[in-house]
Structures are given as structure tokens and as C-alpha cells.
Image (tube, helix red, strand yellow):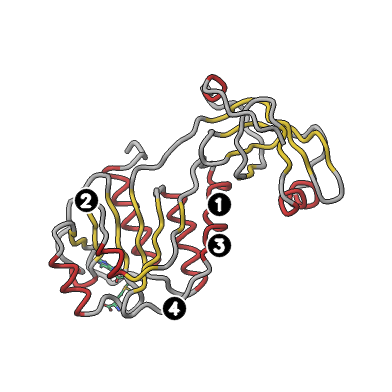
Amino acid sequence: MSKNPPHDDDRSAGPRTERPKVRLYLEHPLGKGQHVDVSQDQAHYLLNVMRLRENDVVALFNGRDGEWAARLVDTGKKRATLRVESPTAPQQRPPDLWLLFAPIKKARTDFIVEKAVELGVARIQPVQTEFTNAERIRRDRLQAHAVEAAEQSGGTFVPEVAELESLRRVLARWPEGRVLWWADEGLAGGALAEPAPAPAAILIGPEGGFSPTERARLAALPFVRRLSLGPRILRADTAAVSALTLWQARHGDWGV
Ligand code: SAM
């Protein structure tokens, strides 16, 4: 694989032209003329699932260098090499918004990660709370979900899914200047709080909600603001999507 660094000039993509149907995320640096060997799984996807052949074009992105059109130039039984040709979209970064959430059942946790990537977050931090249903998460699997969501939604950025950490530890090393918007089911029906601009974070609790101790701790922290999501109690996955939407509409990159 070529190790040439990407050139700034090559990244100044103009308006989007017709885009390849297949998009792939990879770690490799991207720049004009580079040759990229994709992984065995990606080769299988390109050749056997999508039935692409030599000379077909796919879109590549790595989270840093924007999106590039790349041509299949060499294929084997379980391998494929692409030549990077031209930029198709500039690198984008979502607003500096983190999502903290307590993992719930597997399918619903997957849903939260997928929707967070689609809606636009910079980081996803699973947190263990007193009433969290899950003791462990498969971080690599959730990160793969984040990659897939970025591939499918046309994004060029993949937020990091961090390791599961206790809410207490996350709060103890909270960065200065970042407001934590706590979706507090105890406020259900209260007035909608005004979302704080970036850098910001949203905290969603588990099915059992927050414990009295956690509620007292959160309420005492100067960087925490309480958020009501309306008069009904929402499931955690609905709450995550709603809070992210509210924030994006007010301070995000949706342009509404
Ligand atoms: N078992 C809790 C109860 O009955 O009070 C409900 C927990 S709810 C299923 C999961 C999480 O979604 C909550 O911890 C909170 O973060 C968020 N949430 C749900 N409804 C909300 C609302 N109306 N306002 C603010 N946050 C809400």
C-alpha cells in the first residue's frame, strides 16, 4: 500500500457530483493515486455481496481525509485493491456534542449508537449507572455499528464509542467548559430547558432511571443542566433520539 500523505489541494472537493453507491470506511490515509488493499471482509462485501468488478468505483473515507472515489484495480478470491482517484466530499466534523447513555438491551443499545451517528455526535460514552441493565458491552461491536451507520448515512466522520465507565468516574473527570444536559425523567412535564451550545453532552439513563443518590449528585454539579423531554416517560432509546434532535435543531449543524 502506498504511504503518500494526502495533499490539501486534493481535498478541496467542490459540489458533490454523482456518488458511488458503495461506501467503505478504512483506517488507511487517503490521497490521489494511493493504492489501498481492503480487508478480507471488505473484499467479500465488494466482490460477493455488491458484485463489483474491476474498474468499478466505490467511495472511501477514513474519518480524516474526506471522501474519495476509488477504482477497483486488482481483485483476487479474497482480496481487492483500490486506486484512490479524486475527492468526492470534504471532511466534515459533527458539532462537539457527546452522548452519554446507560446501555440497555442489545438491540436497543445498537439502535442508540446507530441513531447517534446519523444525527451527529462527536463521541459516544456508555456509562454504568446504579440501575444499568448491562454489566459489560462489546465496545468493538458498537464501534462497528458506528462505522456502518456512517457508511450508510453518507457521513465522513465516525465518532469514537468509548469503553463502558461508571457514571461517577465520568463525572469526576468532567472537562471544564462542557455543559452536561441531563435528561431527567423526574422533570417529565416540566418546562423545556434551553439547550447549551457546544461543547456539550447529553446524558440518558437506563430503563430503571437514575437512583436517588445519582439524582442528588447530578443536581449538585455546576456543569449539569436538567432537561425535560415532555410529559410522558420515554424509553431510553426514544429519549436519546429526542434529546439529540432537540440539541441539533438549536445548536447543531442541521442548518434549521
Ligand atoms: N424508570 C424510569 C421512571 O419510570 O421514572 C424511567 C426511565 S426512562 C425509560 C430512561 C431514561 O430516558 C431516563 O433515565 C431519562 O434519562 C430519559 N427520559 C425518559 N423520559 C424522559 C422525560 N420525559 N424527560 C426527561 N428525560 C426522560
Q: Would residue 140 appear left or right of 97 to someone viewing this image?
A: right
Q: Nearer the viewer, mark 2 or mark 4?
A: 2
Q: Which residue is mark 2?
A: 176
Q: Tell me the quadrant of the picture where the C terminus can be found.
A: top left
Q: Residues within 10 Å of mark 1 (few under 14, many from 20)?
A: many
Q: Which residue is mark 3?
A: 140
What's the residue at 30%, 45% (across, down)? 249
Q: Which of 201 and 139 lies nearest the eye of the viewer?
A: 139
Q: Earlier in the sequence, mark 3 or mark 1?
A: 3
Q: CA distance from mark 3 to mark 1?
A: 10 Å
Q: Amino acid at mark 2?
A: Glu
Residue 164, given in percent of the width and then of the height, sits at 42, 68
Q: CA distance from mark 4 to mark 1?
A: 24 Å
Q: Tell me the quadrant of the picture where the N terminus can be found.
A: top right
Q: Earlier in the sequence, mark 3 or mark 2?
A: 3
Secondary element under disc 4, as helix, strand or loop, is loop
Q: Which residue is mark 1?
A: 147
Q: Amino acid at mark 3?
A: Asp
Q: Amino acid at mark 4?
A: Glu
Tell me, yes or no, whether the two marked residues, 4 and 1, touch with CB atoms within 8 Å. no
Q: Which residue is mark 4?
A: 135
Q: CA distance from mark 1 to mark 2?
A: 29 Å
Q: CA distance from mark 3 to mark 2?
A: 29 Å
Secondary element under disc 3, as helix, strand or loop, is helix
Residue 90, given in percent of the width and then of the height, sits at 50, 30
